[in-house]
C-alpha cells in the first residue's frame, strides 16, 4: 500500500514539474471559474427578466377592466417558465426550449422565445458551463495529464527500473491510477463548490445533489481508469495520446451527435402543424356547436334541459352559451391532452433510446444524471407545458363558468347589448406557480444512468486489476 | 513526380495513415448521406403538410362557402408557409432542426403568429446535427493532427533526419511535399463526398465550387498550423499535445467565449416584449373607440376610407383593422429585435475571421442558407405573404362582397423564398491569407532552425 | 566435481541448464552460468545471441522453459519479486527519472525497494560512485550518460545488493568516462558485489572483467578466465568472439 502511495506521489511530483501539464490544468481551472461566474450571471439576468415578465403579466391580467368573460378567454394569459438556479450549473435543454407560453381559449400555443431563436449558431458549439467543463473538457485534460503515466515509463525504461526495485504490477498500476484519480478530484473541486452553492439556492435536496455528484465522480473515474488502461497497453506515450484522443473524440464528440440524429430519424415526431390540423378535424367530427342540427350538441342540449327539468334553453337558470363554452373547451382540451400525451410519449421513447445508447457512451449517461438531477431535462420542460396547459384549462373554464352563471342567456344573445361583468371575477384568480418534478421522480429517472456509470466503472476497475497483474509481461 | 510517387508509396504503406484516411472518408460519406436524407425528409414533411393543408382548405370552403361571409373565410382559414431546404443544405443543416420551416398563418395579426415553433425534442437537439460541416469543422483537424504531427519530428526520432539533412536539395521541399500530399488526401476525403452529394442534390455549380474552396482552405489552414508547430522542432509527443491544444481552443473553447461576449455586448430586446405589447394593443382595441382604430387603419390604407361607416354591431372590417393596427404599432420593436439578431450574427461572422472554426461553420451554413439569416428571410417571406393575404381579403370584407366556395381557390398561395445563400469571396481570401501567413511562417522558421 | 561444489558455495548468481524463448522460438539453449561474489563476468555475443534474454530471465521477467535460476540462493522462477530484492539492474540507456535530481531519484527508488531513504545513505552512495556534490541536486535532464550511470550504480550501492546486472554499460561513453566507469566497477568488486555485464566491447571487457563468456545461439561457447590467462590474449579472444557470431566472416 505504501508503495502505491509512493508511486502516486512521485507521479504527482512529475506532473507538477511538467510545464505543459501545469499550464493546461491552470487553463482548465480558469475556464471552470469563468464558466461558473458567467453561468451565475446569466442565470440572475434571465431569472430577473422572467420574474419581471411574469409579475407584469399577472398585473395586466388582474387589471383588465370589466368585460364579457369570453373576451377574457381570448385575451388569455401569459406564463413564463421560471429558471431553475441549477441551470447555471447544467442548462440542459434550457436554451432550446421556449420561455413563454401564451394561454388562451380554444387554442394550445407552443412555448416561444427560446434562446436559440434569437441567437447565432455559435450557441451550437456548446455553452461554457460547469457541466460542459466536466463532461467534455475535464476528460481531455485528464488525457493530457495522464496519457503517459505508464506508457512513458515503459518508453523510457523506468518501468523496468521500478519493477526491478521489487514493485509489483498492481502496485505500479494502482499508484498511477490513484494519482490520476486525485487529479480528477481536484478538477472536480471548483465545479463541486458551484454545485453545492447552486443546489442550496435551488433547494435541490441532498438526494439529487449527491446523485449528481456521484454521477460526475463515477464519470471522471471511468476516464481515469480508461486513460491508465490505454497507457498501460500502449508502447509509447504518443500512441497512448493519439489512441486516447481518438476515444475521446468518439465518445464525447461523435456519439453524442450521431446518436440523436439516428434516433430522430428512426422515431419521427408529428409536426405542430399536422397536430393542429388533426385536432381541428377530430373536433369537427365530434360536433359543431354552431350547427343547430348537430347531433352531438343536440344531445348535449337535451341532456342539459333534462337535468334542469325545463324544455327550452331560454328557461334554464344558467346561461346556455356558457354551458356550451364549457363543453366545447372540455372537448378541445381533452384532444390537446391526448395529442400532447402522444407527443410527449414519442419524445420519451426517443429519450429512452438515447439512454440506451448511454450504455455505450458514458458521457450520455452522465448528461442524463446531470440534467435530470438539475431539473433542466426534457421532463422538467414537459412538466412546465403540462402545468401550463392545466392552468390554461382551469382559467378558461373559470371564465366560461362565469359566462354561464354571471350572464343571462337573454342578455348574452342580444347582439345590440354590451355584456360586461366585474373584473373582480378574474383579479382574484390565483397566479400560475410552476412545480418542478418531484425529487423521487427525478431520482427514478436518473438512477438507471447512474447504474450504467457504476457498471462502466466496475468493468474498468476489474480490467485494470487484470491488466495490472499482467504488467510484468510487458518486460519480456 | 517520381518523388511524389515515392511519397505516395510511403504513405499507403503506413497503416495508421491509411486507416485515418479511410475513416475520414467513411465519416464524410456518411455525413453527406445523412444530410441528403434529412433534406429529403424535410421536403417530404413540407409536401405532406401541403396536402393536409389543401384538404383542410377545401373542407373549410365547403363549410363556410355557403354562408359566403369573407370575414369567416379570413378568420378561419390558415395558410401553409414553408421554407424548403436549399440544394446545398445537405452539407450544413444548420439551425433548421430548432427553427421552424413550416408555419400556418391567417390574416389576423402576424406578430401573434410569427414566433410559434415546431415540435422537436430539445434533448436530441442539444448536441447539434451530424452533417458534413461538423465533420469538416470538428473532425477533419483532428485527422490532420494525427497525420501531420510527426512530419519532421518522426524523422528525427527514427534517426533519418540527419540522413535527410545531408541531402540539401531535399530539405524542406520534402516535408512540404509530404504535408501537401497528406493534406490533399484529407481534402479529397471530405471534398469528394461533398461534390458527389452536390451532384445528387443538383446543387448550383457556383455554390459547389464555393464549398470546395471552403473545404480546401480550412484544410490548408490546419495544415499550415501543423507546419508552423512542426517548425519549432519539438518531439512528436509535444507536437501532438500542442496541436491538440490548438484544436481544443479553436473548436471547443473560443467559440463558447465568443458566444458569451456577443450575447453580452448585443443584448437582444426580448421578443417577449413584442408579443406582450401586441396583445395589449389587439385586445385593448375592444376598449378603444372603434372610429379611432379605423382612423389609424385608414392612415396606412387610405383606399378603404370611402367605405361605409361602422354601425353599432360587430363588423369584420373593424376586427381585421385592429389586428393590422396592432401589427403596425409594434413594427418599430420588431425591426429593432430583428436588427439586433442580425447584429449578433454579423459579429459572429466577424469572429469567424479570427477563428476559422467559427468562420467556416458560419460560411457552410450561409452556403446552405440554413443559418439565422436564412430563417429571418423566411420570416420576411411570411410577412410578404401575409400582406398579400390581407390585401386579398380586404375588398371582400370592406365592400361586403360575398365569398362563395369558388372564391377560396383565388386565395394567394405562399411562394417559398428563393435561395439566398452564397459564399463571401472576401472571407475566402482572408482565410487563404491567414493560412498562407501561418504556412509561410512555418517554412521560414523551419529553414532557420533545421537546415 | 570438487570444482562444481566450490562454485556452488561462492556463486551468488546461477543459471543451470536454462532454456528459454518466446513462443516456439528458443533463444537460450541449455545455458549454464555462474558469477560469484566479488567477480565481474562479461557476457559477449552478437545480436540475437541471447544476451538480453539472459538478463530478462535473471530479472524474472521471462520464465525459462527448463532449468534453474537462483540469485543469492533465491529461486527466481518461483518468486521473482523476492529474488529482485537481491539484484540491481542498469539498462543500456540508464533509465532514470529526468525530472528528478540524482538525490530524488535515489530517494524514490530506494523507497520503492523498501530501503529507508536516509540522506546519509544517499549521500554516501553518491560519494562512493564519485558524483560531484554540485550535480547531486540538479535534474537528470542535464546529465551526461556517465553521470547517469554513476547515479544508477549509486542506487545499487545504496541498496547494498549482492548482484549487479549491467546492459551495455559502456556504449556511448567517451574514453575518460569508460575509464572512470571501470574504476567504479573495481570499487564494487572490492565490496564483494557480483557483476554480470552484457557488452559488445571486447577491449573493455578484457580490462575489467574477471571472466569473459562468449554467447552464441543461446549457449556459452567459450569462457576465458583471467586467473588462468593473466594477459587475456586479445587476439585469441577476438578470434573466439568472431567464431561466436554465426554467419560472420572473420
Image (cartoon, rainbow, N blue to C red):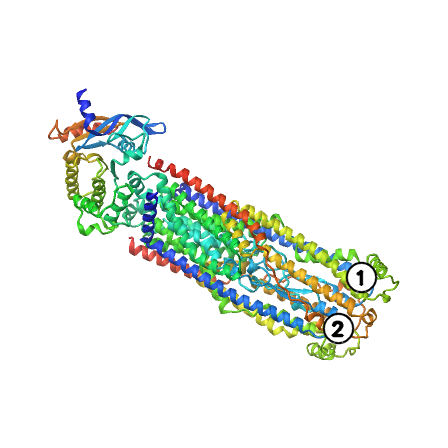
Secondary structure state at the residue bearing disc 1: loop
**Number of other residues with Cα within 10 Å of mark 1, as a class: few under 14, some 14 to 19, many 20 or more:** some
Foreground of the two, B152 or C188: C188
**Number of other residues with Cα within 10 Å of mark 2, as a class: few under 14, some 14 to 19, many 20 or more:** some
Foreground of the two, C40 or A59: A59
Tag 2–tag 1 contact (CB < 8 Å): no
Q: Horizontal and vertical percent for residue C224?
A: 16, 28
Q: Identify the residue at image location x=64%, y=51%.
A: A345
| Residue at the outermost top position | C1
Foreground of the two, A4 or B372: A4
Q: Horizontal and vertical percent for residue A19?
A: 33, 55
Question: Looking at the rendering, in which quadrant would you find the C terminus of chain C?
Answer: top left
Q: Which residue is mark 2?
A: A421
Q: Which residue is mark 1?
A: A289
| Residue at the outermost right position | A311
Say whether residue A103 is left or right of residue B92: right
| Residue A123 visible to an observer of this rendering | yes
- What is the tally of numbered marks visible in this picture? 2
Q: Horizontal and vertical percent for residue A183?
A: 39, 51
Q: Place residue B436 in its image quadrant.
A: bottom left
Q: Identify the residue at image location x=20%, y=51%.
A: C135
| Residue B347 visible to an observer of this rendering | no
Q: Place residue B325 in its image quadrant.
A: bottom right
| Residue at the outermost left position | C231
Q: Horizontal and vertical percent for residue B397?
A: 77, 71
Above or below residue B152? Residue B320 is: below
- State which chain disc 2 sits on: A
Secondary structure state at the residue bearing disc 2: loop
Amino acid at each position: 500500500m505504501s508503495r502505491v502511495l509512493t508511486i502516486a506521489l512521485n507521479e504527482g511530483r512529475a506532473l507538477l514539474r511538467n510545464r505543459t501539464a501545469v499550464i493546461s490544468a491552470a487553463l482548465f481551472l480558469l475556464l471552470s471559474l469563468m464558466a461558473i461566474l458567467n453561468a451565475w450571471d446569466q442565470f440572475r439576468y434571465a431569472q430577473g427578466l422572467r420574474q419581471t415578465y411574469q409579475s407584469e403579466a399577472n398585473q395586466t391580467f388582474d387589471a383588465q377592466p370589466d368585460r364579457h368573460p369570453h373576451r377574457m378567454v381570448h385575451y388569455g394569459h401569459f406564463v413564463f417558465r421560471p429558471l431553475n438556479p441549477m441551470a447555471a450549473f447544467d442548462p440542459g435543454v434550457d436554451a432550446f426550449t421556449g420561455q413563454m407560453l401564451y394561454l388562451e381559449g380554444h387554442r394550445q400555443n407552443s412555448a416561444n422565445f427560446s434562446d436559440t431563436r434569437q441567437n447565432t449558431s455559435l450557441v451550437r458549439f456548446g455553452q461554457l458551463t460547469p457541466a460542459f467543463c466536466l463532461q467534455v473538457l475535464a476528460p481531455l485534460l485528464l488525457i493530457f495529464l495522464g496519457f503517459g503515466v505508464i506508457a512513458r515509463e515503459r518508453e523510457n525504461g523506468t518501468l523496468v527500473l521500478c519493477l526491478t526495485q521489487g514493485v509489483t504490477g498492481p502496485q505500479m498500476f494502482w499508484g498511477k491510477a490513484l494519482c490520476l484519480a486525485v487529479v480528477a478530484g481536484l478538477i472536480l473541486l471548483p465545479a463541486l463548490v458551484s454545485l453545492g452553492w447552486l443546489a442550496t439556492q435551488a433547494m435541490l435536496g441532498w438526494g439529487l445533489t449527491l446523485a449528481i455528484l456521484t454521477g460526475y465522480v463515477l464519470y471522471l473515474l471511468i476516464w481515469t481508469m480508461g486513460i491508465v488502461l490505454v497507457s498501460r497497453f500502449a508502447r509509447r506515450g504518443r500512441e497512448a495520446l493519439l489512441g486516447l484522443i481518438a476515444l475521446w473524440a468518439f465518445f464525447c464528440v461523435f456519439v453524442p451527435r450521431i446518436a440523436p440524429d439516428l434516433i430522430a430519424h428512426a422515431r419521427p415526431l408529428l409536426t405542430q402543424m399536422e397536430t393542429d390540423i388533426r385536432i381541428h378535424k377530430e373536433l369537427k367530427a365530434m360536433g359543431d356547436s354552431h350547427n343547430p342540427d348537430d347531433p352531438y350538441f343536440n344531445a348535449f342540449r337535451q341532456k342539459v334541459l333534462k337535468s334542469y327539468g325545463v324544455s327550452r334553453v331560454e328557461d334554464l337558470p344558467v346561461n346556455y352559451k356558457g354551458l356550451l363554452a364549457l363543453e366545447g373547451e372540455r372537448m378541445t382540451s381533452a384532444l390537446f391532452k391526448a395529442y400532447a400525451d402522444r407527443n410527449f410519449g414519442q419524445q420519451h421513447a426517443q429519450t429512452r433510446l438515447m439512454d440506451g445508447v448511454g450504455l455505450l457512451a458514458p458521457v450520455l449517461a452522465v448528461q442524463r444524471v446531470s440534467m435530470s438531477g438539475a431539473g433542466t431535462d426534457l421532463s422538467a420542460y414537459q412538466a412546465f407545458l403540462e402545468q401550463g396547459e392545466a392552468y390554461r384549462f382551469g382559467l378558461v373554464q373559470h371564465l366560461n363558468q362565469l359566462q354561464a352563471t354571471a350572464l343571462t342567456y337573454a342578455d348574452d344573445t342580444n347582439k345590440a347589448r354590451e355584456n360586461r361583468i366585474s373584473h373582480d371575477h378574474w383579479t382574484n384568480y390565483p397566479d400560475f406557480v410552476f412545480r418542478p418534478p418531484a425529487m423521487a421522480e427525478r431520482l427514478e429517472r436518473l438512477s438507471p444512468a447512474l447504474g450504467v456509470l457504476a457498471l462502466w466503472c466496475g468493468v474498468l476497475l476489474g480490467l485494470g486489476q487484470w491488466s495490472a497483474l499482467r504488467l510484468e509481461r510487458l518486460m519480456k | 513526380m517520381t518523388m511524389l510517387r515515392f511519397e505516395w508509396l510511403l504513405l499507403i504503406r503506413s497503416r495508421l495513415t491509411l486507416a485515418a484516411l479511410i475513416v475520414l472518408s467513411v465519416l464524410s460519406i456518411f455525413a453527406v448521406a445523412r444530410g441528403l436524407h434529412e433534406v429529403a425528409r424535410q421536403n417530404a414533411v413540407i409536401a405532406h403538410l401541403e396536402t393536409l393543408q389543401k384538404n383542410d382548405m377545401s373542407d373549410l370552403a365547403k363549410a363556410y362557402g355557403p354562408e359566403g361571409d369573407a370575414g369567416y373565410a379570413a378568420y378561419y382559414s390558415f395558410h401553409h408557409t414553408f421554407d424548403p431546404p436549399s440544394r446545398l443544405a445537405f452539407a450544413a443543416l444548420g439551425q433548421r432542426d430548432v427553427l421552424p420551416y413550416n408555419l400556418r398563418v391567417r390574416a389576423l395579426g402576424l406578430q401573434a403568429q410569427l414566433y410559434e415553433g415546431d415540435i422537436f425534442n430539445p434533448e436530441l437537439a442539444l448536441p447539434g446535427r451530424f452533417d458534413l460541416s461538423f465533420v469538416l469543422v470538428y473532425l477533419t483537424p483532428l485527422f490532420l493532427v494525427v497525420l501531420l504531427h510527426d512530419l519532421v519530428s518522426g524523422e528525427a526520432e527514427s534517426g533519418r533526419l540527419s540522413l535527410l539533412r545531408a541531402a540539401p536539395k531535399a530539405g524542406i521541399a520534402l516535408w512540404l511535399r509530404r504535408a501537401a500530399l497528406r493534406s490533399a488526401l484529407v481534402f479529397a476525403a471530405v471534398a469528394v463526398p461533398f461534390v458527389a452529394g452536390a451532384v445528387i442534390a443538383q446543387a448550383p455549380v457556383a455554390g459547389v465550387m464555393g464549398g470546395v474552396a471552403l473545404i480546401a482552405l480550412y484544410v490548408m489552414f490546419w495544415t499550415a498550423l501543423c507546419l508552423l508547430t512542426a517548425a519549432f522542432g519539438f518531439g512528436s509527443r509535444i507536437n501532438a499535445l500542442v496541436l491538440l491544444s490548438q484544436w481544443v481552443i479553436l473548436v471547443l473553447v473560443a467559440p463558447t467565449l465568443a458566444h458569451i461576449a456577443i450575447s453580452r455586448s448585443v443584448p437582444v430586446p426580448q421578443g417577449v416584449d413584442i408579443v406582450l405589447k401586441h396583445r395589449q394593443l389587439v385586445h385593448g382595441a375592444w376598449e378603444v373607440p372603434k372610429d379611432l382604430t379605423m382612423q389609424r387603419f385608414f392612415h396606412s390604407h387610405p383606399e378603404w376610407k370611402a367605405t361605409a361607416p361602422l354601425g353599432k354591431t360587430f363588423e369584420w372590417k373593424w376586427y381585421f383593422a385592429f389586428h393590422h393596427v396592432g401589427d403596425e404599432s409594434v413594427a418599430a420593436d420588431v425591426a429593432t429585435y430583428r436588427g439586433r439578431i442580425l447584429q449578433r450574427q454579423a459579429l459572429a461572422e466577424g469572429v469567424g475571421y479570427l477563428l476559422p472554426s467559427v468562420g467556416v461553420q458560419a460560411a457552410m451554413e450561409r452556403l446552405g442558407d440554413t443559418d439565422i439569416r436564412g430563417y429571418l428571410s423566411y420570416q420576411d417571406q411570411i410577412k410578404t405573404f401575409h400582406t398579400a393575404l390581407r390585401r386579398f381579403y380586404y375588398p371582400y370584407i370592406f365592400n361586403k362582397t360575398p365569398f362563395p366556395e369558388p372564391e377560396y381557390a383565388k386565395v394567394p398561395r405562399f411562394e417559398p423564398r428563393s435561395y439566398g445563400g452564397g459564399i463571401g469571396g472576401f472571407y475566402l481570401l482572408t482565410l487563404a491569407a491567414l493560412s498562407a501567413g501561418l504556412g509561410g511562417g512555418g517554412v521560414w522558421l523551419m529553414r532557420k532552425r533545421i537546415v | 566435481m570438487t570444482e562444481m561444489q566450490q562454485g556452488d558455495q561462492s556463486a551468488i548468481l546461477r543459471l543451470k541448464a536454462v532454456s528459454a524463448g518466446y513462443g516456439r522460438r528458443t533463444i537460450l539453449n541449455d545455458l549454464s552460468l555462474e558469477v560469484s561474489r566479488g567477480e565481474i563476468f562479461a557476457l559477449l555475443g552478437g545480436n540475437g545471441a541471447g544476451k538480453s534474454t539472459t538478463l530478462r530471465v535473471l530479472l524474472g521477467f521471462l520464465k525459462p522453459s527448463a532449468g534453474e535460476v537462483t540469485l543469492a540462493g533465491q529461486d527466481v522462477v518461483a518468486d521473482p519479486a523476492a529474488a529482485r530484492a537481491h539484484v540491481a539492474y542498469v539498462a543500456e540507456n540508464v533509465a532514470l527519472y529526468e525530472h528528478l535530481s540524482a538525490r530524488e531519484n535515489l530517494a524514490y527508488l530506494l523507497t520503492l525497494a523498501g530501503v529507508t531513504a536516509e540522506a546519509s545513505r544517499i549521500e554516501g552512495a553518491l560519494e562512493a560512485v564519485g558524483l560531484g556534490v554540485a550535480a547531486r541536486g540538479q535534474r537528470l535532464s542535464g546529465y551526461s550518460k556517465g553521470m547517469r550511470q554513476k547515479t544508477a550504480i549509486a542506487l545499487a550501492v545504496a541498496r547494498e545488493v549482492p548482484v549487479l546486472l549491467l546492459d551495455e554499460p559502456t556504449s556511448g561513453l567517451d574514453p575518460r568516462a569508460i575509464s572512470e566507469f571501470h574504476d567504479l566497477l573495481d570499487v564494487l568488486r572490492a565490496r564483494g558485489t557480483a557483476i554480470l555485464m552484457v557488452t559488445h566491447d571486447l577491449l573493455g571487457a578484457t580490462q575489467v572483467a574477471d571472466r569473459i563468456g562468449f554467447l552464441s545461439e543461446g549457449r556459452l561457447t567459450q569462457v576465458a578466465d583471467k586467473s588462468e590467462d593473466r594477459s587475456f590474449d586479445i587476439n585469441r579472444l577476438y578470434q573466439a568472439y568472431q567464431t561466436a557470431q554465426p554467419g560472420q566472416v572473420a
